[in-house]
């Protein structure tokens, strides 16, 4: 009960400070997909894919820790492409922002986060 309240307040607080992370998502214009991760995905998933901001604080809308290799290795590339294009719950759909081909290429970036 108490924990839920604290979490709710935290979520509300960071939403107020950061704005809606799904707003103003840029379109992929070609070029560097790593840069596109920074521009379009890192606001929720973190620069390193671990769902944390630069100070190590968990981001409110991360949803998945790409550095958790045990979990990431169970995921299929095709599922990740699908979620990227079509979205899922709080994960926005990117089908208007990037091609299926680019979404497929983006998988390599997400796989690198857990490759250690
Ligand atoms: C507004 C926040 C937000 C942004 C921006 C965002 N994501 Fe997500 N993403 C999420 C959330 C939340 C989930 C978890 C969805 C669920 O399973 O309920 C998720 C899940 C995913 C998954 C599935 C992980 C799994 O196996 O469960 C992939 C792949 C993914 N995101 C890729 C991307 C890529 C690539 C980008 C940038 C092009 C991106 N995301 C941008 C919030 C975001």
Image (cartoon, rainbow, N blue to C red):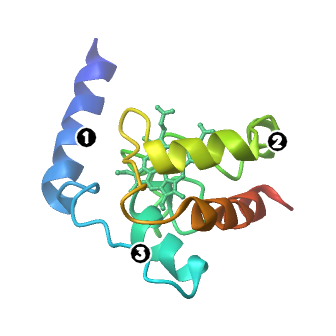
Nearer the observer: mark 1 or 2; the answer is 2
Residue at 61% of width from left, 49% of height from top?
A: 81
Residue 11: mark: 1
Which quarter of the figure is the C terminus placed in?
Answer: bottom right
Residue at 45% of width from left, 50% of height from top?
A: 58
Q: Is 34 left or right of 77, judged from the image as shown?
A: left
Residue 62: mark: none
**Secondary structure beneath disc 1?**
helix
* Front residue (pair 64, 96): 96
Q: Is mark 3 within 8 Å of ligand 1?
A: no
Residue 73: mark: 2
Residue at 41% of width from left, 75% of height from top?
A: 39
Labelled pair 2, 3 in contact (Cβ < 8 Å): no
Residue at 49% of width from left, 50% of height from top?
A: 85
**Residue 102 appears in view:** yes
Labelled pair 1, 2 in contact (Cβ < 8 Å): no
Spatial CA span between label 3 and label 1: 22 Å
* Front residue (pair 28, 38): 28
């Amino acid at each position: 009960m108490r924990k839920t309240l604290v979490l709710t307040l935290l979520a509300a607080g960071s939403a107020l400070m950061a704005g809606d992370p799904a707003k103003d998502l840029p379109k992929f214009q070609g070029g560097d997909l790593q840069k596109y991760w920074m521009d379009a995905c890192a606001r929720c998933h973190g620069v390193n894919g671990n769902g944390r901001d630069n100070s190590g604080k968990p981001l409110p809308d991360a949803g998945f820790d790409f550095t958790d290799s045990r979990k990431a290795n169970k995921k299929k590339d095709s599922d990740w492409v699908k979620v990227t294009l079509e979205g899922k719950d709080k994960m926005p759909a990117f089908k208007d922002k990037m091609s299926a081909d680019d979404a497929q290429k983006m998988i390599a970036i997400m796989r690198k986060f857990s490759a250690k």
